[in-house]
Amino acid sequence: MIVYTKLWQTMKERCVSQYKLEKEHNISRGTLNTLRKNGNVTVYTLDTLCRILNCRIEDIVEYIPDEEHKNTL
């Protein structure tokens, strides 16, 4: 499963709020809700977030194997 827990940590470290993403960088509230729910977003969105936050993809995205997948390995 792809999770965005690190995104919120990175935003906090860089003092970038969700409000700032919406108002200054045109990241939609829907996209932020999708990220909060660990849903699917485009690579373009991830690229934009990395540019805004001046970070690497590893600073916003993490892969965590789900239990079903773990059991098949």
Image: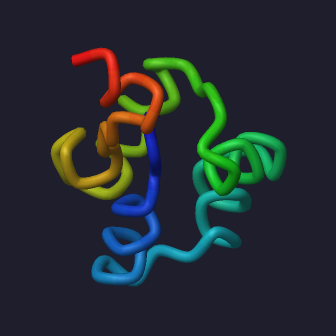
Report whether residue 26 is seen: no
> What percent of the width, then of the height, locates residue 33?
76, 52
Please determine whether, in this image, residue 40 is positioned above or below residue 26.
above
Residue shown at 65%/35% (left/top)?
39
> What percent of the width, then of the height, locates residue 2?
44, 36
Please determine whether, in this image, residue 71 is positioned above or below residue 63.
above
Could you say which is closer to the camera, residue 37 or residue 23?
Answer: 37
Q: In which quarter of the image is residue 43?
A: top left
Could you say which is closer to the camera, residue 29 or residue 35?
Answer: 35
> What percent of the width, then of the height, locates residue 61?
34, 44
Q: In this view, does 20 lie to the left or right of 55?
A: right
Report whether residue 22 is seen: yes
Please determine whether, in this image, residue 17 is positioned above or below residue 67.
below
Q: Is residue 1 left or right of residue 56?
A: right
Residue shown at 42%/44% (left/top)?
49
Residue shown at 30%/44% (left/top)?
62
> What percent of the width, then of the height, locates residue 1?
45, 34
Q: Going by the picture, which residue comes out furthest to the front?
A: 71
Q: Quadrant of residue 67?
A: top left
Residue shown at 72%/42% (left/top)?
34
